[in-house]
Image: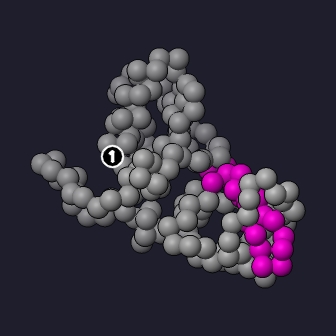
């Protein structure tokens, strides 16, 4: 098994590829497989979020490129920047990880959120695509990383999506 404990400079030429969905790229401890099937163990600093294109240094000297795996997503495309900003605002207000590109907002497939965005007047399509959401202003996982509560609508009860992501899905 290949053991990976540190990052490598992004300009290093990779000889291996590690293809993972976003939720697994948020784990600092993970037993997985390289693209060609060899077992790999990740032992990275807590709080590490791997991004597409990152390079990792294996203990045997190999350089491993991180690749965002295609996963079930919803996409909103529009030439109207205000409408896209409105969709991103409402998704972010629900602590949903979003990927932003020119003319595009992408988020993990969730039919309730899809209907909410449709209600804003946007067309939502379902797709399989690599998902590499924003890291957030505080370096969190697509949201902000400080704990806090919410108010009158009861949203503050129970674990929130970003809290679960920070704890590795637990």
Q: Image quadrant of residue 16?
A: bottom right
Left or right: 42 as drawn, with respect to 145: right
Residue carrying label 1: 94
Residue sitting at x 43%, y 43%: 111
The residue under the point 53% across, 41% down is 99
Q: Considering depth in this image, is 88 or 153 the residue closer to the camera?
A: 88
Q: Residue at x 50, y 67 (%)?
A: 47
Residue 140 vertical placement versus 169 (above, below): above
**Residue 130 in the image: x percent, y percent?**
65, 46
Residue at the left extreme?
A: 152
Read off the magenta span: 51-71
Q: Image height check: is 32 above or below 138?
A: below
The residue under the point 45% across, 56% down is 140
- The answer to whether residue 71 of the structure is visible from this angle is yes
Quarter of the image with the C terminus is bottom left
Q: Position of residue 108 (x, y in %)?
A: 51, 47
């Amino acid at each position: 098994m290949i053991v990976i404990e540190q990052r490598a400079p992004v300009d290093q030429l990779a000889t291996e590829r590690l293809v993972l969905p976003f939720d697994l790229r948020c784990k600092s401890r993970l037993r997985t497989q390289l693209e060609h099937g060899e077992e790999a163990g990740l032992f990275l600093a807590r709080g590490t979020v791997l991004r597409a294109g990152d390079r990792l240094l294996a203990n045997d000297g190999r350089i491993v490129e991180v690749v965002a795996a295609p996963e079930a997503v919803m996409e909103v495309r529009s030439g109207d920047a205000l409408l896209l900003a409105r969709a991103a605002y409402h998704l972010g207000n629900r602590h949903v990880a979003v990927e932003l590109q020119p003319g595009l907002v992408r988020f993990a497939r969730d039919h309730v959120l899809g209907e909410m965005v449709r209600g804003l007047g946007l067309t939502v399509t379902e797709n399989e695509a690599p998902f590499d959401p924003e890291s957030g202003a505080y370096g969190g996982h697509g949201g902000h990383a400080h704990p806090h509560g919410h108010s009158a609508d009861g949203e503050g009860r129970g674990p929130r999506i970003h809290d679960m992501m920070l704890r590795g899905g637990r």
